[in-house]
Image: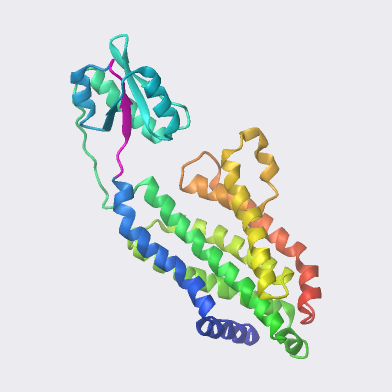
Amino acid sequence: MNKIISLVKKDWKNSLNDKMTIFVLFFPIIISIVVRIFLPSFENASIKIFIDTSVPNNKVVMLENYFEIEKLENYNSLENKVNSYGDNLGVIFSENSLKLVLTGSESPHIINVVKSVLNYVNQDKSLNYEIESLGIRRSVISDVLNTGVLILIVGMVGFSMGFTIVEDKESKMFSAMGVSPIILSDYLISKIITVLIQSALFALIAQLILIGLNFNLFSFFIIFISGSMMGIFLGFVIGIFSDNQNAAIAVSKVTIFICCMLPMISFLVPEQFQKLFYVIPGYWVMKVFSISILNIEGNLILTLFIALIIHLLFIIALTPKMKKTFKIGRL
């Protein structure tokens, strides 16, 4: 245990002395401050509704109480506008009532809000409502941004670990460890502990900057655990397959595409093709994110468990390569 603690202390000391590592660790904090400054603008964004000339003026006046309205000359113009804007819907007046025009890709939350308003406006009623607050004012946008910053932090810390391993290679530190009491498992555990401590510290700082003490501890824990596992895996991949800093940058680009970009692309792929992404560890992290933050249907705990198991299996699969590359001794 003393050997692991010594290695963790060494990693912390090296992190504080290396300018690039300091930038990597503090960059997400800077992003958090920027997001915090502009978050009110994001949260106050209004829903935009396109209408055509069929909508009576009295209905237009009522709609303007709830939405940003843009009036168009005809239905074709309205249809083109709706197709070109993701979450902006169209409204027409047909059969003595307001009808909703949408593409089907809009947020279900926005659709429900607009439908509720149209139902009241069709009855020539005003929609009076009260919001009973528990003291926490949140939006989907803020949750997505907060989670994005959190994943960015644990990912950056993981990449930092990978570059630290590469530095150990270049400094011939593994040769020195080969004749010391330190074994491979000591080295690997120290790296994992360092990543977890740094990720937890900077993630908490970021959350405090973004939303103060009013963050959901359970969601934070879920995202932190799944994101940290992905960061640790990516760090090991970079460290194992890179012999120098230039190679580490090249490997980073490949791993980012496979483990981060492909899972994001999976959101655009039909359900029947989702199985093609099951073998990508980052896919399950994105699933955890989508279930816990975007409220997409799914079993959160089971998805988190699958994410942890897949990352663990990939790390175990890398063990023979680790032994050959690091040459520190038995595992």
| Residue positioned 64% across, 64% down in the render | 252
| Residue positioned 37% across, 51% down in the render | 142
Which segment is the magenta one? 45-54
- Marks counted in the figure total 0
Q: Nearer the viewer, residue 95 or 126?
A: 95
As for residue 52 lying within the magenta part, the answer is yes
Q: Is residue 28 above or below residue 266?
A: below
Q: Residue furthest top?
A: 95
Q: For residue 310, what is the image quadrant?
A: bottom right
Helix, strand or loop: magenta stretch: loop
Q: For residue 163, what is the image quadrant?
A: bottom right
Q: Is residue 178 above or below residue 247?
A: below
Look at the image and name its color scheme: rainbow
Residue 27 pos. (x, y %): 46, 69
Residue 225 falls left or right of residue 75: right
Classify the position of the N terminus by image quarter. bottom right
Q: Nearer the viewer, residue 26 or 285?
A: 26
Q: Is residue 120 above or below residue 246?
A: above
Q: Is residue 225 above or below residue 82?
A: below
As for residue 281 lying within the magenta part, the answer is no
| Residue positioned 22% across, 30% down in the render | 64
Residue 226 pos. (x, y %): 56, 58
Q: Nearer the viewer, residue 231 or 106?
A: 106
Residue 10 pos. (x, y %): 58, 86
Q: Taking the image as drawn, is residue 199 in sight?
A: yes
Residue 115 pos. (x, y %): 33, 25
Q: Taking the image as drawn, is residue 301 in sight?
A: no
Classify the position of the C terminus by image quarter. bottom right
Q: Nearer the viewer, residue 246 or 55?
A: 246
